[in-house]
Amino acid sequence: MSQLLLDVNALTMRFGGLVAVNGVNLKVKNRQIVSIIGPNGAGKTTVFNCLSGFYIPTSGSVMFKNEQIAGLKDFQISRKGLVRTFQHVRLFSNMTVVENMLVAQHRHLNTNLFSGLFKTPSYRRKEHEAMDHAAQWLEEVGLLDVANRQAGNLSYGQQRRLEIARCMVTQPELLLLDEPAAGLNPNETKELDELIIKLRDEHEISIVLIEHDMSLVMGISDHIYVIAQGTPLADGSPDEIKNNPDVIKAYLGED
Amino acid sequence: MQGKLYNALFASGIALILTCLMVGIKLDTEGTQLAIKGATTQQWLWIGLGIGLVFLSQIFSDQIDSAFSKVPKPQLSKLLPEEKKMSVLKPWLIALLVVVMLIWPFMVSRGSVDLATLALIYIMLGLGLNIVVGLAGLLDLGFVAFYAVGAYTYALLSEYFGMSFWACLPISAGLAALFGFVLGFPVLRLRGDYLAIVTLGFGEIIRILLNNWTAVTGGPNGISGIAKPTLFGLEFSRRAKEEGNIPFHEFFGIDYSSSYKVIFLYLIAVILTIFVIYVINRLIRMPVGRAWEALREDEIACRSLGLNRTVIKLSAFTLGASTAGFAGAFFAARQGFISPESFIFIESAIILAIVVLGGMGSQVGVILAAIIMTILPELAREFSEYRMLLFGLLMVIMMRWRPQGLVPMKRPHLELNR
Amino acid sequence: MSEFSLYLLQQLINGLTIGSTYALIAIGYTMVYGIIGMINFAHGEIYMIGSYVAFIVIAGLLGMGLVSLPIILIVALIVAVVISSTYGWTVERVAYRPLRGSNRLIPLISAIGMSIFLQNFVGISQGYRDVALPPQVVGGWTFGDPSVFEVTVSYMQLMIWAATLITMTALTLFISRSRMGRACRACSEDLGMTNLLGIDTNKIIALTFIVGAALAAIAGLLLGLYYGVVNPFVGFIAGLKAFTAAVLGGIGSIPGAMLGGLVLGVTEAMTAAFFPSEYKDVVAFGLLVLILLFRPSGLLGKPEVEKV
């Protein structure tokens, strides 16, 4: 087989009579940044919900690392290395930043009841490792200084970065980011831009991005998919998309 | 002002409708016929007083609200020394408390020690339910069923197989946990309110089964003559029940006193309670404790991070159930007699009231509430008729004005030290 | 027909009778759940209060020398509905409305507190023991071979069927035709949106509690007459059963609650035909767990789509 990390074919999601997603294809290679763009209500988030197991797609196949994952439960998909963020930040806001990072590592920790009750050496070692791992990622996204603060008290930009760090600490291979730049100021957007590129180049993961900020999308994407009203409209490199008449029509309206 | 008057009149009218028939008239059986009786003058006075109170509270609702907000909430944390000093003092304080708890029974009456033992049982039950309701945020209304499973496990094993209390203790806890697992598995995948109603039903089922499975459980007559715990094989009766055993007092060459047994039971309860407190203290600092908290805050985020919510909720539900089973085995041993009467819904409600009053998730709060809830009814016996009425009212009032309880939960935060 | 099949027919008749009263109570659960997404834990107590009020009125009118049974029953019905509805409204106002918008656990606990309070309020004012009312509606219609097995449909049972049928029809018309009914349906689709459209959702929520309580009061009167006894704890088990019926039919769906009530009533009666009658509660509960396991949306409910 090819180098495809994610291979989505004819993905369709129906809610009763409403077809939210209709025959969407999506291909992501290793170390690639792929964007999904389209007008509001085009079904982009529904695609994410299908990929991450929050919805079970009505039909179509989702191959991740050459394995069918459509129909698996959300937590099973996440454990396979496909992790997502949300349009609205979903942090554990009453917990501290570092605790958010520890919860994300839950399944890498020693959750054996008795070793926890008696603090066995292996339990302590695992907890230490998790702490180090968390600290490493907090440093990476520039949140080490606020590690002991409550997550809910961070600024919006910091919360966005914490959400990405929290995903990264689960050691994913594919990261789905749902409008990560929404609500960020130009400075924060630039930092985000650099972070996403660093994730691809240094940490060798692939990223699928839903985004409305066109300069961000055009600047960092290796490949772009356009969806309108749940149906695929076009795909190609940023330059191809910029000059595609169908896309221009969909964005600017008729005439 | 006119709107207020209208509101107050409306509320008083409602209060009149609510009370006039249900309190003002009493059903009475005369021979085979049903008849009604008017209430006594005193009852009518009460009705009038109630309606008057409703009227006044509506007229002065603003003033009452502002008075409520001005009343300083009990800041128990301020009474304690600062956190830094606290961490030095804490082990000493705990040691002191344990010593006092161990010496105290030798200086007071048998009745007080007995009452303290009862309070300790409720502390264990409250802490167990607190795992489920307070830490994991799952409403369990049939908690008493697991208590019953624990109690009957020990009673039956002791009666039919002559097994000792100490051997049965883990078995009781384990069996209650198993029941919790089997019940929780299908239900915990669904929304929270279903769990509440299913556990409520489960509590009833267990009681019905105990009542009707006469061949094994003795039905409504219960099981009596359950063996008391022994101290390394030493019994606390005047004469040894089993051939070849020596009673405690003969072994140590002291005079027989029935209070030894009471004190011994109390001391067992203290040890069991300390054990439960230790376990829960560890749990909230462990990954599973963090996962409970995270699930309460945002279930969807947890799932997206690879946490299996069913397993995590199930762990809380099962651990809570096993604590109840633990307490149940001790209860059976202390009473020496159990029947389905001890495991009715009211018990579940009392335990829930303890958790709610103390503060969901707060261990200190639950312990305090359990002590208050056991001792207060003893002090105010003439009001015992109104006990459940007040519990119900208290739950409504607490949820409205202080849902976090008397001593709000303070979770230990893990710190990153660099 | 053989003795056994006649016996089963009798059980079916009994089951449908009990089932229709379950359906009446279940509608209260389902309507409230449909709109605010919460279980009204004090609903069983409203039913119990309805029974007490009916008993008080009947005993009072009989004591005053009134002999016309229809008049007695109609007065009892009206008073029971008015007082129970007032209780239903109060429950919403005290235990639910001030807590709207807080963590789900909180109104649930407050409603349980309310339920415990009402149980003991009635217990203290009316006594905790059973109160018995001699049968008022007597006689019935019998068929079958007297030497084999006689099947009886009592007038009381006929009355329960008729009353349930009339109530259900009235409710269906109210929901589908009236302005308030339309608002109710809108609220159960999307509470927030309905509010934005200028409909006073507080009023609609209060209305569902009142309607639910009125139906529970009718069930209270009917079951009170049917069984002839009432005590402060009857609401607990009846509430549990009715909730099971609501889940069975698909919580949130009114026709579902009706169907669920009948299915549950018949299942229980059939169980009682083969096992000691104490176990019928066990069966009802087992049914609840099975439904939750295999078809959580119930017989007629729509599956829920989670919003992410």
Image (spheres, rainbow, N blue to C red):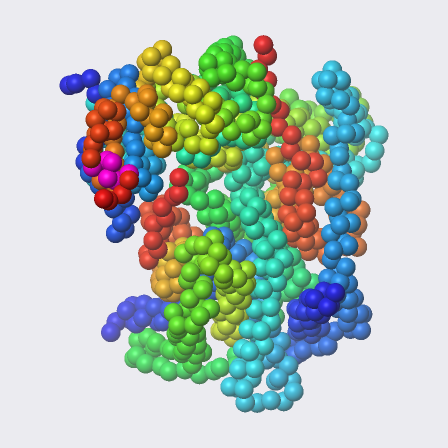
Task: Choose between C238 and C128: the one closer to the eye.
Answer: C238
Quadrant including the N terminus of chain C: bottom left
Residue, x 45% and y 54% (percent of image)?
C193
Q: What's the magenta bit mostly, secondary-structure-wise?
A: helix
Q: Position of residue A141 (x, y in %)?
A: 47, 17
Looking at the image, can residue A113 be seen? no
Residue, x 68% and y 47% (percent of image)?
B401
Asked if residue A249 is among those painted magenta in the image, a careful observer would answer yes
Q: Position of residue C116 (x, y in %)?
A: 62, 55
Quadrant including the C terminus of chain C: top left
**Quarter assignment of residue A192:** top left
- In the rendered structure, the answer to whether residue B240 lies left or right of residue C287 reads right
Asked if residue B164 is among those painted magenta in the image, a careful observer would answer no
Residue, x 34% and y 68% (percent of image)?
C12
Task: Choose between A187 and C48: the one closer to the eye.
Answer: A187
User: Please, which residue is most extreme toward the front here?
Assistant: A255
Q: Position of residue B176 (x, y in %)?
A: 50, 36
Magenta segment, which residues? A246-251
Q: Position of residue C282 (x, y in %)?
A: 43, 53
Q: Is residue B319 above or below residue A203?
A: below
- In the rendered structure, the answer to whether residue B250 lies left or right of residue B199 reads right
